[in-house]
Structures are given as structure tokens and as C-alpha cells.
Amino acid sequence: MTDTFVPPTRFAVPGRIAVSNRAAAVWQRATVVEIRRETPAASTFRLKVPDWQGHLPGQHLMLRLTAPDGYVAQRHYSIASAPEDAEASGEIELTLDHVPGGEVSGHLHTVARVGDTVEVRGPLSGFFAWPGDRPALLLGAGSGVVPLMSMLRHWRKAGPSVPLRLLVSARTPSDLIYADEYGDETRVILTGTEGRLAAGHLAPLLSSSSLPEGGWEAYICGSNGFAEHASRLLVAAGQPVDRVRIERFG
Amino acid sequence: MTSETAFEPTRGFTGRARAADRDPRLPPGQYDAADGWPVLSAEVTPDLTPADWTFRVDGLVTSPRTWTWDEAHALPASEYRGDIHCVTSWSKFGVRFGGVSLDAFLAAAGPRPEATHVVAYSHTGYTTNLPLSDVTDGKAWIVWEYGDGPLPPEHGGPARLIVPHLYFWKSAKWIAGLRLLDHDEPGFWEQNGYHHRGNPWREERYSGD
Ligand SMILES: Cc1cc2nc3c(=O)[nH]c(=O)nc-3n(C[C@H](O)[C@H](O)[C@H](O)COP(=O)(O)OP(=O)(O)OC[C@H]3O[C@@H](n4cnc5c(N)ncnc54)[C@H](O)[C@@H]3O)c2cc1C
């Protein structure tokens, strides 16, 4: 009995991206080499990770902080930078929202400075990764745009061979992370003035005339409320459920 | 370059919860999510009504069986009161889930002696693997109640598996069935780099832990 059991259901486990078990298991010391403010509530932390094994856009890592008495706090963070950046520099970027009262994001936003070290482990999970091989429809809200930005940056660096579209929602212009980096591929939805993501935003991308060959791989990232809302809209608009991947930040 | 065991504090980090007054219910590397209950599923929440829900036990059993919602509810009620732990670092204390012990379903299906493992699978197609010994003898439930109400859809409603002594990715939401096998077969997250067993007290998060 060596056959793999496939349940009789629709959501197919993609399983096309192998995850390095070694990278997932080992903590590495990373040095903060740059801190950049993105919005009043979000900053990007550039980390030098000497033994980084590479990543695919969309993957995340685990970050760990240790107190003098050995108490540790660890959280997941998506990788914001493109794989090409890490290959060239040995550095990766994370973008963190400053969660009020947050233990880990609070430390990084208010205490951490260039030269400090933190520990990281990863990259983790191939499920939300996009290697750049299939047309990608990306929907993000708030800091949920972080892994999608890694995809967009990779798409630009690798030379766009397949279509990519990004819908990013933010409350106001000043809440929009990476505001300067969006181009024609991106539609920004400012929920404070125009309301939240709606069927009308998706219809033009999913109409039979605009559907790319082979259809879209859809990637949704953000809070659970956004993920539920966006995934239901997308499926109602005709996107097959087994081609929707969701990363929920909790 | 790596620091598997080296212990070096992060400059300026004291931690919100001091090790000394750390709640003994909290496994290593976890924090108390208090009233929060983060949702972490990779797939679209299915539109699954109790009328559509079924639960099947097959594979290495003497009588493969499928239960409907009403048939499952006719089994003796059982509940879990206690803590739950998610691999993404949050834990929740003193929760209540109401449903039926998995033992009741297994007793009806009759596991064959050669069965050693199960693959739990969802109506979405999500899978996760468990040793049979981790889901028998009062260690696992099929549940449809959370607190005093129905289990919310984004948390696996109408019904999910719970295996509270392991990380919560083992507690498959929208549970559709269990297949009993004579070998271990990695499920969805296990194929994506997670540990095969997932014991929170040993911090079995990723394969290699
Ligand atoms: C796969 C994945 C990828 C992610 N990627 C990103 C990313 O790219 N960027 C990003 O910003 N986030 C990301 N997150 C979220 C991130 O992991 C953290 O959840 C987030 O940074 C908050 O952590 P924290 O330690 O700052 O806050 P926590 O200390 O965990 O607090 C979270 C909330 O709970 C409250 N709280 C918790 N405990 C207490 C307590 N004892 N007393 C009072 N209040 C309490 C806090 O006030 C706060 O509102 C990701 C999550 C996942 C699962």
C-alpha cells in the first residue's frame, strides 16, 4: 500500500513546491541592516541572513526574540523582497504592522535598531508560494500585501512571462504600504472613500474575454475578515475554489 | 552561521510575559490568545450545511460506514473542555467543544488489527495524518458546538475533528472522513514542511524538530 490517498473533494493539494526541511528546522541569526518607514503604522526591516537558502515569493518565516532570562516570543512574517534580491545580497526584507500592544511587532518598531540581531527560521510553507509560472491574480489588504509584493517584485525582475494583476485595499492613501511601487498591473481600492472590495472590481478580470490562458492562480492575503470576504467574492465571480490560496494573518 | 542551541538574548527585548509568572498551561513558544481565536485555513471556507455534511470511516475497518448529521447526533454526546494550541504560536485556555467522541465512530466501524494510522480529510480536500493511537481512547472528538453555540463556519462548522493534545492543524475543519491505513501518509501541511506528529509540549512544529 504505497498509493497516496486522495480524498474525493475539490480543493486539490497543490504540492508542486517542495519545502526545504533543513531550512525550516534551523534557527539562524539575522542582523538588521536597514529600517525603512512605509506608512505611519508599518515599517520594513531589512535583514542580513548569512546562510539564507533562498525562497519563493509568498513564503514566510518564523522570527524569534529572546529575553535575557531565556523567555522567547516567535511570530510568522511573510517575506516582502524578491528572491533575486536575496540571491544578490544575502538580505531579505520583512514589513511589519505595528500592532498596538503587540509583543514582537512592538519591540521591532520601538526598540530595534540597525545592528541588532534577531533569529529567523525558514522559509516555510510552499502552499502560498508563487514561482512565477502561472498567471496570478493577487488580492491583498493592509499588511496582507507583503507576500504579494514579493510576487510583484519577482515578476518584474524575472521579466513578466505570464500576466499578473494585483488588487490592494487600504483605508486611506497614508495606510497604503509600498504606495510608490504600484504600476499598471495594480488597482488600489481605498475603502475609506470607495468602500470595500466588490464584485465590480473582480468582474473585469474574470470575464471570459480577459481570462488568461489556463485561468488565474488566485492568492488572497490579509486579515481573516478580508480573506473570507475576498474569497467568497472571487468564487462567486467564477474562480474555481481549488485555485484559490489564502494566507490569513490571524 | 546557524545558532541551533546558542542562546543569545535580543538587545532590549524583555518579553511581555515573564518566564517566572508564565502560565503553566502554556507550552513552549506559545502565547495566550485570550479572547481571540485566529482563523488559519489555506482554503476557501466551504458553504457546507448540516444537511450536506457526512462523516465516513473506511480503509482498514471491518465495516466502512458513513454517518449523516442526524445519525452522528444520535451517538452518545461527549465534550472536550480544556486548552488548544496552534502551531502559529497562539494557545487558548478553557474552551468547550461539544460533539461525539471519535471512539464511538471507530467502535461502529471496527478498526482492523493491522491499522496503525489515519488520514483525516475534509469536505474541502484538506488532509492531515495521525497515528491511530492519537485519536483513540478519549483523545479525539467530532464536534459541532463551540461554547454554547454552533461551531462557526470559519472554524470548521458545521463539524470538525479536534485532537486537542496536538497542534491544531491536526484538528481538520469541515471533517469528511477518516481513512485507516497500515502506514503513515503525510497530509497537507506535513507535505508542506510541518512535523508529522505535532506535539506542542515538545514543540514539534516543522519536520526535523
Ligand atoms: C503566515 C503569517 C504571515 C504573517 N505575515 C505578517 C507580515 O508580513 N506582516 C505583519 O505585520 N504581520 C504578519 N503576520 C502576523 C504576525 O505573525 C503577528 O501576529 C503580528 O505581528 C502580531 O504579533 P505581536 O507579537 O506584535 O502581537 P501580539 O503580542 O501577538 O498581540 C496581538 C494582539 O493581541 C493583543 N494581546 C495579546 N496578548 C495580550 C496580552 N497579554 N495583553 C494585552 N493584549 C494582548 C495585542 O494587543 C494585539 O492586539 C503574519 C501571520 C501569519 C500567520
Image (cartoon, rainbow, N blue to C red):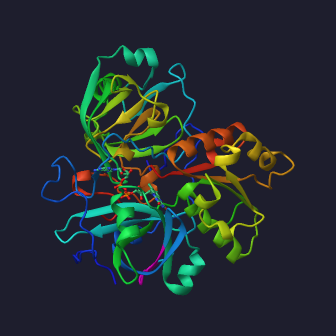
Can residue B49 be seen in this snapshot?
yes
Q: Quadrant of the N terminus of chain B?
A: bottom left
Residue A47: in magenta span: yes
Horizontal and vertical percent for residue A187?
73, 56
Name the quadrant containing residue A21.
bottom left
Q: Quadrant of the C terminus of chain B?
A: bottom left
Q: Nearer the viewer, residue B89 or A99?
A: A99
Can you say whether B202 is above or below B208 in the image?
above
* Residue B66 is inside the magenta segment: no
Q: Please identify the quarter of the rendering in which residue A70 is found.
A: bottom left
Q: Quick check: B20 above or below B178?
A: below
- Position of A139 compared to B202: left or right? right
Where on the image, by quarter, is ligand 1?
Answer: bottom left
Q: Measuring from the top left, give residue B154's x and y in whole percent.
A: 48, 36
Residue A168 lies, in percent from the top left, at: 65, 55
Q: Is residue A130 visible?
A: no
Up the image or down, A35 lies above or below A241; here it is below
Position in image of residue B58 (x %, y %): 42, 31
Residue at image location 42% in from the left, 28% down from the top: B151
Quarter assignment of residue A98: bottom left
Give the magenta range.
Answer: A45-52
Number of callouts in the render?
0
Q: Residue at x 21, y 64 (%)?
A: A71
Near-viewer residue (B174 or B30): B30
Query: Which residue appears farthest toward the left when viewing the image?
Result: B20
